[in-house]
Image: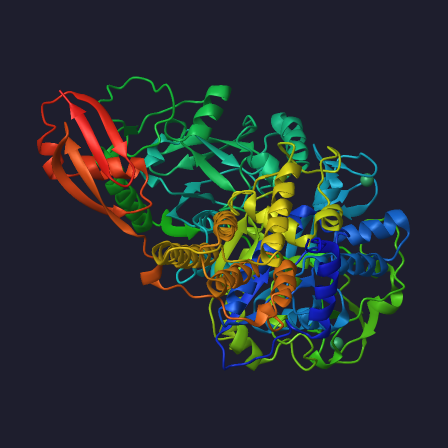
C-alpha cells in the first residue's frame, strides 16, 4: 500500500518551500522572452469568494504554462484599496478605514496564498499606501500640466435635509436619501475632470489588440460617435435674448417632419420660455426628473412623458411654428440638450406624439407608400416627400442636400457628437488619494509642487455621518500656504475616483519599490504591454476605457512608448450555485476555504476549470469537485504503486503497445498545449483524465517496457503541473526527479508520432466493392459514413436508388444497402 494522498499536508509544505526559495520572483531577465500575465486585482472587501478564485486560478494555470514554455513570466498581485465601502465601515463600526482595509488585506493575502499561484509577492502593490498614491497624485499633476485635467461645474446628488453630497450608492430607488428618506436633488459643484473626450476617436479603435468582440462593441457604444448635422431653429420669444435653439440630428432628411421640439428639463432656457399658465406643471416635472438617475431616465422600459412649455421655435425650412416640450429622456449633457422630434420616423417620438396627440407627418416614404397613416414609426431610409424642394431625393441624397442647404444659409453645419463625456474624478470622500491642488486667493489654482508629494491623508480625520469629506473639517489639512506666493491658502478637500488608482497599477508592478518615479522606464519597456489581461466583463467600459485613456495620454507625454496597455483581454464567466448567482441573502455562497481544507487547493483549481468553458462560467456542484478529487487520488496511486512488466509478451504485441503509448502521449501533449494556448481549460482537463485512464489500463496489461511507461508518467506530471502544482511537485519528487517540476520545460510533441494510425476502409454498395478510403484508425462511425457518402465513386451507384440501411464493421468496411 502506498501512503495516502493528503493535499492539506503537501500543499502547505510546498507553498512554504516555494516562498522560501523565492521560486516565482522574477527579474528583468532579457535573455528570455517576457510574458506579463495580469489578473484584475481585487477590491479589499475582506473575503475572497469563489468568484475571485474563478478569475485567478485559471489565469495562474496559464501563467505557469507560459513559464514552463520558457517565458520570463511576471504574474503579480495587489489590492485596490481605496473606496467608499471602507469609509462606510468606518462610520458604521467605528473603525478607521485604514485599519479596516489593512485587516482585510491580511486576510485576503492569506487566502490568495492558498491558491498556490506564482504571484511574485515582492511586487505587491496596495493603492492606499502613500508610496503608491504619491504617484497617483503625480499622474494627476502630469495630466494637469498636459491640459488634460480641468475644473468645471458638475451636478452631484444632494440631500437638502442632511445638507450633504450623496454618492450614487447612497441614493435609494426613486431618488431618496438612504439616511433620512428625503427626496434627493441635484446640485452643481466645482469638480475636477479629465479630458478623456480628447481621445474619443482613438478609444473606439482596437486595432492590434486581441479583445472580445462584445467588449469592443460596448466601448464603441460608450464613446457613441455619431456623424450628423447641427440645425438651428429660430427663437423669437419676448424677454429672451437667445435667437435660436440648436439641435443635433443624424437624419436631416427628416427636417420637414418635425412637429415638436423637446428640451432637457434642466435646459437653461426652460424657466425663461415657460408661459405663466404652464409654470406650475413645468416646475413640478423638472423637480421630479432631477430625482432620477440618467439610467432611469434613459430606460427603454419607462414610458416617455413630458410637459408643454407654452413656447415655440420656427423651423426655418418651412417657416412652421414648432411647440417646445420638455421630457426627461433628453439629457442636457448629451448633444445640445435639445432634440427635434420627427414622430413619423422615430419610435420614441412616435410614442410621445400618440400620447399627447401631436401631429405625425410622413416625410420619408416607405416603398409602395400611398399616403396612408403609419401604424408605427418608419425609421428606414426611403424617398423624401412633403419636403418642398427636396421631394424625390433618397434619404442618402437628402442628408447631403439638406446639410448643404443649411450650411449655405448659415442655418446649421455638419457635426460629430459623442456620448462620451469627460471623466469626473472628484469624490467628496475621505478614503481616496487627495487631489494635489491648492487654492490661493491671489494665484488661483496652484498645483502642489512634485517635491511636496505625497499630499498625505491625515490619519486623525473625524468621521461624521455628514456624507462630505472629513477632510473639509480638518483644519490642519485644509489650511496651508501657497507654493507660489506663500500667502495662506486652502487645499482641495476632494479625493480622486478610485478608478484613477487602477488606471496605472499595471505599470507599478514593473518596479513596485521605485521611490524616485512612478515607474522605472526600463522596466516598463521590458514588461509592458500586458500580454494577457483577465477579469470580469463588468469592467468593459469604466476601468478598461480609463486605463486605455491613461496609456494614450502618457504616450503623448513621452512617458511610455506603446499605445495600448493590454494586448489580449479575456473575460471569464460567472460561477453560480443552485442555479442562481451567489449572494449572501440567498445563502448559496461557496466559500473556497472550506473546500481547500477538505479536498485541497489543487482540486478546487482543477474543478473550476473543468466545470464549464471559462468564458461561459458554470454551476458549482459538490459531486463535481468530488470527481476531481477522486481523479487526483487515482493519479497519486497510479504513480506511486509502481509498475511491473507483465511476463512474456510477443515482440509484436509489445511493439504495438509501445507505438500506441507514444501516439497517445504525443496527442495528449498536443491537445493540452493547444487548449492552454486558447484558454480552453475544461477540455484540457478532460484530455488529462483520458490520459490517466489510458495509463491505468496500460499498467494493468504490463505490455510496455518500464522506462517507457515511466516516461509517459513524467509527461502526465508535467502536463498536470500548471493545474495541480502541489500534487505534481510532490509526485515529481517521489519519482526521484530534481526539484522543482515548475522549473522544467514544457513537453513537446512530435507531429509524426502524434499522427493517428491509418487504416483502409472498404466501401461496398450491396456487397460490391466500390471504393477504398484511407482513414485514421480512431475514426467514428459518423465520420466514416460522411466520407463514404462523400465519395464520387460511391455516389454513382446510389443515384436513383432507395436507401435501405448501412452496415458498419469498425476498422474494416461500410456496406450501403440500396434497392
Ligand atoms: Zn438625507
Ligand atoms: Zn498664491
Vertical comparison of 246 with 453: above or below: above
Residue drawn at x 78%, y 62% as measured from the top left: 493
* Residue 476 picture location, percent across and down: 88, 69
Instruction: State the quadrant of the C terminus.
Output: top left
Q: In which quarter of the image is residue 147?
A: bottom right
Vertical comparison of 555 with 224: above or below: below
Direction front: furthest residue: 648
* Residue 201 picture location, percent across and down: 43, 58
Give 13 or 655, whichever is nearer the viewer.
655
* Residue 162 picture location, percent across and down: 84, 43
Q: Is 601 situated left or right of 664 in this image?
A: right
Q: In which quarter of the image is ligand 1?
A: top right
* Residue 227 picture location, percent across and down: 38, 49
Give 239 or 161, whichever is nearer the viewer.
161
Residue drawn at x 35%, y 39% as measured from the top left: 251
Q: Is 545 situated left or right of 373 in this image?
A: right
Q: In which quarter of the image is residue 784?
A: top left
Name the image colouring: rainbow
Residue 547 seen: yes
Vertical comparison of 300 with 491: above or below: above
Give 586 or 695, whichever is nearer the viewer.
695
Amino acid at each position: 500500500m502506498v501512503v495516502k494522498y493528503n493535499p492539506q499536508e503537501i500543499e502547505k509544505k510546498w507553498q512554504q518551500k516555494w516562498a522560501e526559495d523565492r521560486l516565482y520572483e522574477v527579474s528583468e531577465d532579457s535573455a528570455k522572452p517576457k510574458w506579463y500575465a495580469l489578473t484584475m486585482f481585487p477590491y479589499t472587501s475582506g473575503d475572497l469568494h469563489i468568484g475571485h478564485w474563478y478569475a485567478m486560478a485559471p489565469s495562474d494555470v496559464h501563467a505557469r504554462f507560459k513559464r514552463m514554455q520558457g517565458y520570463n513570466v511576471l504574474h503579480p498581485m495587489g489590492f485596490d484599496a481605496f473606496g467608499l465601502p471602507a469609509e462606510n465601515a468606518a462610520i458604521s463600526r467605528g473603525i478607521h478605514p485604514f485599519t479596516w482595509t489593512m485587516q482585510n488585506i491580511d486576510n485576503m493575502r492569506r487566502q490568495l496564498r492558498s491558491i498556490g499561484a506564482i504571484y511574485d509577492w515582492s511586487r505587491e502593490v496596495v493603492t492606499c499606501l502613500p508610496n503608491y498614491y504619491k504617484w497617483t497624485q503625480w499622474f494627476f499633476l502630469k495630466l494637469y500640466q498636459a491640459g488634460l485635467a480641468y475644473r468645471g461645474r458638475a451636478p452631484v446628488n444632494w440631500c437638502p435635509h442632511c445638507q450633504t453630497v450623496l454618492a450614487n450608492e447612497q441614493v435609494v430607488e426613486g431618488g431618496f436619501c438612504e439616511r433620512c428618506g428625503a427626496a434627493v436633488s441635484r446640485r452643481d459643484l466645482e469638480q475636477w475632470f479629465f479630458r478623456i473626450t480628447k481621445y474619443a476617436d482613438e478609444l473606439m479603435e482596437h486595432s492590434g489588440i486581441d479583445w472580445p468582440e462584445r467588449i469592443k462593441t460596448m466601448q464603441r457604444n460608450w464613446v457613441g460617435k455619431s456623424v450628423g448635422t447641427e440645425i438651428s431653429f429660430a427663437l423669437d420669444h419676448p424677454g429672451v435674448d437667445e435667437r435660436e435653439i440648436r439641435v443635433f440630428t443624424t437624419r436631416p432628411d427628416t427636417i420637414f417632419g418635425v412637429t415638436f421640439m423637446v428640451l432637457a428639463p434642466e435646459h437653461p432656457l426652460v424657466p425663461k420660455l415657460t408661459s405663466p399658465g404652464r409654470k406650475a406643471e413645468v416646475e413640478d416635472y423638472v423637480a421630479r426628473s432631477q430625482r432620477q438617475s440618467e439610467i432611469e431616465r434613459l430606460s427603454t422600459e419607462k414610458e416617455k412623458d413630458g410637459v408643454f412649455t407654452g413656447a415655440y421655435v420656427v423651423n426655418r425650412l418651412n417657416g412652421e411654428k414648432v411647440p417646445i416640450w420638455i421630457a426627461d429622456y433628453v439629457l442636457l449633457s448629451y448633444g445640445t440638450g435639445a432634440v427635434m422630434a420627427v414622430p413619423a420616423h422615430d419610435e420614441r417620438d412616435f410614442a410621445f406624439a400618440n400620447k399627447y396627440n401631436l401631429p405625425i407627418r410622413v416625410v420619408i416614404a416607405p416603398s409602395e407608400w400611398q399616403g396612408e397613416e403609419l401604424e408605427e414609426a418608419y425609421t428606414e431610409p426611403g424617398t423624401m416627400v412633403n419636403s418642398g424642394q427636396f421631394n424625390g431625393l433618397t434619404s442618402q441624397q437628402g442628408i447631403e442636400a439638406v446639410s448643404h442647404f443649411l450650411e449655405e444659409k448659415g442655418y446649421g453645419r455638419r457635426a460629430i457628437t459623442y456620448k462620451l463625456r469627460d471623466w469626473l474624478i472628484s469624490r467628496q470622500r475621505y478614503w481616496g488619494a487627495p487631489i494635489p491642488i491648492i487654492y490661493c486667493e491671489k494665484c488661483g489654482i496652484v498645483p502642489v509642487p512634485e517635491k511636496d508629494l505625497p499630499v498625505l491623508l491625515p490619519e486623525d480625520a473625524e468621521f461624521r455621518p455628514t456624507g462630505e469629506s472629513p477632510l473639509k473639517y480638518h483644519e490642519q489639512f485644509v489650511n496651508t500656504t501657497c507654493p507660489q506666493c506663500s500667502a495662506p491658502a486652502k487645499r482641495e478637500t476632494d479625493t480622486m475616483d478610485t478608478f484613477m488608482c487602477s488606471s496605472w497599477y499595471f505599470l507599478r508592478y514593473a518596479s513596485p519599490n521605485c521611490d524616485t518615479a512612478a515607474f522605472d522606464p526600463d522596466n516598463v519597456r521590458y514588461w509592458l504591454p500586458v500580454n494577457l489581461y483577465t477579469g470580469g466583463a463588468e469592467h468593459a467600459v469604466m476601468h478598461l476605457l480609463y486605463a486605455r485613456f491613461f496609456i494614450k495620454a502618457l504616450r503623448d507625454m513621452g512617458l511610455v512608448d506603446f499605445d495600448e496597455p493590454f494586448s489580449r483581454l479575456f473575460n471569464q464567466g460567472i460561477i453560480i450555485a443552485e442555479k442562481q448567482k451567489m449572494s449572501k441573502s440567498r445563502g448559496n455562497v461557496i466559500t473556497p476555504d472550506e473546500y481547500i481544507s477538505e479536498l485541497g487547493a489543487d482540486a478546487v483549481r482543477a474543478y473550476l476549470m473543468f466545470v464549464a468553458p471559462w468564458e461561459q462560467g458554470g454551476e458549482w456542484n459538490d459531486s463535481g469537485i468530488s470527481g476531481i478529487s477522486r481523479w487526483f487520488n487515482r493519479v497519486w496511486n497510479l504513480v506511486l504503486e509502481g509498475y511491473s512488466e507483465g511476463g512474456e509478451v510477443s515482440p509484436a504485441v509489445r511493439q504495438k503497445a509501445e507505438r500506441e503509448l507514444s501516439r497517445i502521449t504525443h496527442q495528449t501533449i498536443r491537445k493540452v498545449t493547444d487548449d492552454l494556448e486558447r484558454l480552453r481549460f475544461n477540455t484540457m482537463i478532460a484530455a488529462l483524465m483520458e490520459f490517466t485512464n489510458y495509463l491505468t489500463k496500460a499498467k494493468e496489461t504490463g505490455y510496455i517496457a518500464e522506462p517507457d511507461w515511466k516516461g509517459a508518467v513524467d509527461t502526465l506530471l508535467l502536463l498536470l503541473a500548471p493545474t495541480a502544482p502541489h500534487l505534481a511537485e510532490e509526485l515529481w519528487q517521489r519519482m526521484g526527479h530534481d526539484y522543482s517540476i515548475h522549473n522544467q520545460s514544457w513537453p513537446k510533441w512530435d507531429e509524426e508520432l502524434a499522427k493517428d494510425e491509418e487504416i483502409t476502409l472498404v466501401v461496398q454498395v450491396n456487397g460490391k466493392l466500390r471504393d477504398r478510403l484511407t482513414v485514421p484508425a480512431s475514426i467514428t462511425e459518423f465520420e466514416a459514413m460522411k466520407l463514404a457518402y462523400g465519395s464520387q465513386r460511391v455516389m454513382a451507384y446510389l443515384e436513383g436508388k432507395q436507401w435501405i440501411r448501412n452496415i458498419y464493421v469498425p476498422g474494416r468496411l461500410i456496406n450501403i444497402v440500396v434497392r
